[in-house]
Amino acid sequence: MNLYSKIYQESGFSKYWTQTIFWLVFYAINFYFSPSEISLTKALIWSAGNTLIFLIAVTINLNVLLPKFMLRQSIVSYLALLIGISLLLTPFITLFNIWISDSYNAHTHNPLVQAHFHFINLVIITALSSLVRIPLEWLKIQSEKNELVAKNMETELQSLKNQINPHFLFNTLNNLYALTLKKSDLAPQIVLKLSDMMRYMLYECNEPEVVLEKEFQYIENYIEIEKLRHVSDSRIEFNFDPALYTKKLAPLLLIPFIENSFKHGLQASLEKSYIEIEALLVDRTLEFKVNNSKPLAMPGQRIFNNSGGVGLANVKKRLQLIYPNQFNLDINDEPDSFSVHLKIKLKDS
């Protein structure tokens, strides 16, 4: 839960208790400063009556004037209505105080029986209530804004993840289809590895982060499947640091780089093709490197652009959403090679 949401929820939870306590204190202050010449009974009534009128003014301000005018930046209308409400209530509170004082003529020097005194107090107290509510409304807006951003981010991440799964499944099924046409004895092994991959995608990848050991196992299954359909003299090397096995990372974040390397690095027309994959733990940082060969483009022919296609564009977007300011991605596109160097600051596990 973000800070704004926490603060606002706590303030919303205690809002009514806070208001109740405030008006009880307001009543007590009124009673303490009640006119000395009136009896105890009248002092209690006087305090209750004044508190009620101020309560009406503040309630109208907070529930009507503030949300419908002030917060919608209709400042002139808000001030006019605030003064109007105060003018409307001034005669009531003035007459009430005159009634409590028994005789107006005997207390003309007392500000409690003077209309302008009550008018000014009504304007001040009501306006002060706005100054208290405005920060709470700002917190509410920030809370709603942050919740909306979080929901949009979650939806976008799920959409990006959904783009990954069918892509890999399609490629793997194509590989399996090719093996079945050849009636290869390796087909059952591929089915088993595909089953492991599907289990990982369907059940493990629903979590925000997964243990890297499972992610590496998924990658190894993918590599073993891809090896079957490439020329035997291709060099494929991968090394995963065991220190990373217990660390956690967002699922399916590394595989697009490997899929891209197989797509472009091991082409039948390319001699001495290679793919080098390495994942190391360096100072609580995952350093992931992929380097692959690339066929030289014929004049006027473009093999693939620096973005690496949809797969790498997808993973870049996910990195920005999941690990903002916590990763560094360096892509180097040379005429005969393509390399990726990704650094991600890992959370302490």
Image (cartoon, grey):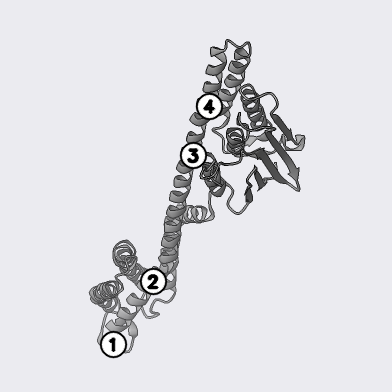
Give residue 171's mark.
4
Give residue 227's mark.
none
Q: CA distance from mark 2 to mark 4?
A: 89 Å
Mark toward the viewer: 2 or 3: 3
Q: Position of residue 121 (x, y in %)?
A: 35, 78
The residue nearer to you, when weighing 265 against 68, is 265
Q: CA distance from mark 3 to mark 4?
A: 18 Å
Q: Position of residue 347 (x, y in %)?
A: 67, 45
Find residue 71 and report its image quarter.
bottom left
Q: CA distance from mark 2 to mark 3?
A: 73 Å
Q: Which residue is mark 2?
A: 40
The residue nearer to you, when weighing 14 against 232, is 232
Q: CA distance from mark 2 to mark 1?
A: 20 Å
The residue nearer to you, when weighing 176 against 131, is 176
Q: Secondary structure at mark 1?
A: helix
Q: Secondary structure at mark 3?
A: helix
Q: CA distance from mark 1 to mark 3?
A: 81 Å
Mark toward the viewer: 1 or 3: 3
Q: Which residue is mark 1?
A: 106
Q: Secondary structure at mark 4?
A: helix
Q: Residues within 10 Å of mark 3 (few under 14, many from 20)?
A: some
Q: Position of residue 314 (x, y in %)?
A: 52, 42
* Quadrant location of the C terminus in the rendered image: top right
The answer to whether residue 109 of the structure is visible from this angle is: yes
Q: Give amino acid for label 2.
A: Leu
